[in-house]
Image (cartoon, grey):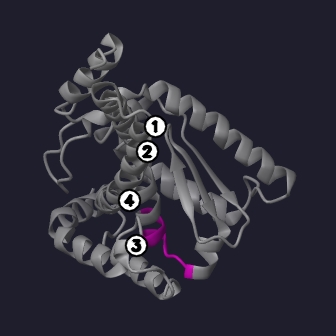
């Protein structure tokens, strides 16, 4: 039997110990999505945020070179930035690192019905999602909160950590039982299954955290439901939920409806405040 590599064994033990890591910051009210995943601790946050900053910069440069990057005077970009100014102050409650992020919001001319927020607070919307869905400010806030939630809950970092842990496990199997290339195949299959399962969980979590962020900023969380009704109508040809990394529209709407009682008081308080 082959002997263990000390470094691999220690890495695996460290991964297991980190699974019980505490959340970045506890929430006393609002939605409950549990602790931050301990897998995030396997990958340095600073490195991911720096890489995201560089990638975002390149994307904006490419958009500008195609005259697709909206200027600061663009009414829709100004609208997005006004909404972001209200939502961003509530981000730190979900991730203390957010207070040091250099937040950016940009608008790219494209028919894509999409938006994103990279680690480190780099936000972009495509004109397609604004134009095709005819979004209200409340609905925009729900999308923005959803995308911010992915960054705040460090879903990209979590997936990278899970991938690393899976590879560690495959390496241990290879050394224990002499599986060789089979161990790497196991790792590849494991990563695919992880991405499928946790992709759905991450999306559901981002829906709920996004609702809370928007509610605290004074945007009606019921807009999350009308938003996904619009998205469902626009994606009638989408695959069934079990074939997708995203929950089905009906599932998302049901989850949000169940959590409305948790966030409506925050919205009402923000409106009065």
Q: Disc 2 on helix, strand or loop?
A: helix
Q: Nearer the viewer, residue 212 or 184?
A: 184
Ranked by sequence position, the earlier of labels 1 and 4 is: 1
x, y percentage for residue 206?
35, 57
Residue behind mark 1: 181
Expressed as whole percent of the image width and height from the top left, the position of residue 49 reads 52, 32
* Residue range (magenta): 133-141
Q: Is residue 98 above or below residue 33?
A: above
Mark 2 in CB contact with mark 1 (< 8 angstroms): yes
Q: Quadrant of residue 174?
A: top left
Disc sitting over residue 243 in the figure: 3
Inter-mark Cα distance, 2 to 4: 17 Å
The outermost residue toward the top is: 6
Q: Which residue is mark 2?
A: 185
Q: Residue, x 33% and y 54% (percent of image)?
A: 198
Please tell me which of labels 1 and 3 falls first in the chain: 1
In the rendered image, which quarter contains the N terminus?
A: top left
Query: Is 202 a magenta residue?
Result: no
Q: Earlier in the sequence, mark 2 or mark 3?
A: 2
Left or right of 135 in this view: 68: right
The CA span between labels 1 and 3 is 28 Å
For discs 1 and 4, the disc positioned in front in the rendered view: 1
Question: SS at mark 3?
Answer: helix
Q: Nearer the viewer, residue 30 or 13?
A: 13
Q: Residue at x 49, y 33 (%)?
A: 101
Give the residue at x 50% y 83%: 235
Q: Judge whether 96 appears above or below 255 on screen.
A: above
Give the percent coordinates (x, y) of residue 207.
34, 63
**Mark 4 or mark 2, which is nearer the start of the sequence?**
2
Asked which quadrant contains residue 162, the reply is top left
């Amino acid at each position: 039997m082959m002997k263990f590599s000390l470094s691999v064994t220690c890495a695996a033990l460290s991964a297991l110990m980190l699974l019980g890591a505490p959340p970045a910051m506890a929430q006393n009210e609002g939605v409950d999505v549990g602790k931050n995943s301990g897998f995030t601790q396997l990958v340095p946050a600073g490195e991911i945020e720096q890489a995201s900053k560089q990638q975002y910069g390149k994307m904006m440069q490419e958009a500008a070179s195609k005259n697709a990057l909206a200027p600061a005077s663009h009414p829709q970009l100004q609208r997005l930035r006004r909404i972001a100014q209200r939502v961003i102050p509530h981000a730190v409650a979900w991730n203390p690192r957010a207070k040091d992020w250099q937040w950016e919001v940009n608008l790219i001319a494209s028919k894509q019905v999409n938006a994103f927020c990279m680690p480190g607070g780099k936000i972009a919307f495509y004109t397609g999602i604004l134009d095709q869905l005819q979004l209200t400010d409340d609905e925009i806030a729900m999308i923005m909160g959803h995308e911010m939630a992915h960054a705040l809950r460090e879903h990209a970092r979590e997936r990278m950590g899970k991938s690393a842990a899976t590879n560690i496990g495959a390496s241990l199997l290879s050394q224990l039982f002499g599986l060789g290339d089979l161990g790497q195949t196991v790792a590849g299959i494991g990563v695919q299954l992880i991405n499928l399962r946790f992709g759905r969980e991450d999306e559901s979590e981002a829906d709920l955290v996004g609702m809370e962020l928007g509610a605290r900023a004074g945007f009606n969380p019921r807009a999350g439901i009308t938003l996904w009704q619009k998205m469902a109508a626009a994606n009638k040809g989408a695959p069934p939920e079990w074939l997708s990394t995203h929950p089905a529209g009906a599932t998302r709407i049901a989850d949000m409806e169940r959590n409305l009682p948790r966030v409506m008081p925050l919205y009402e308080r923000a409106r009065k405040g």
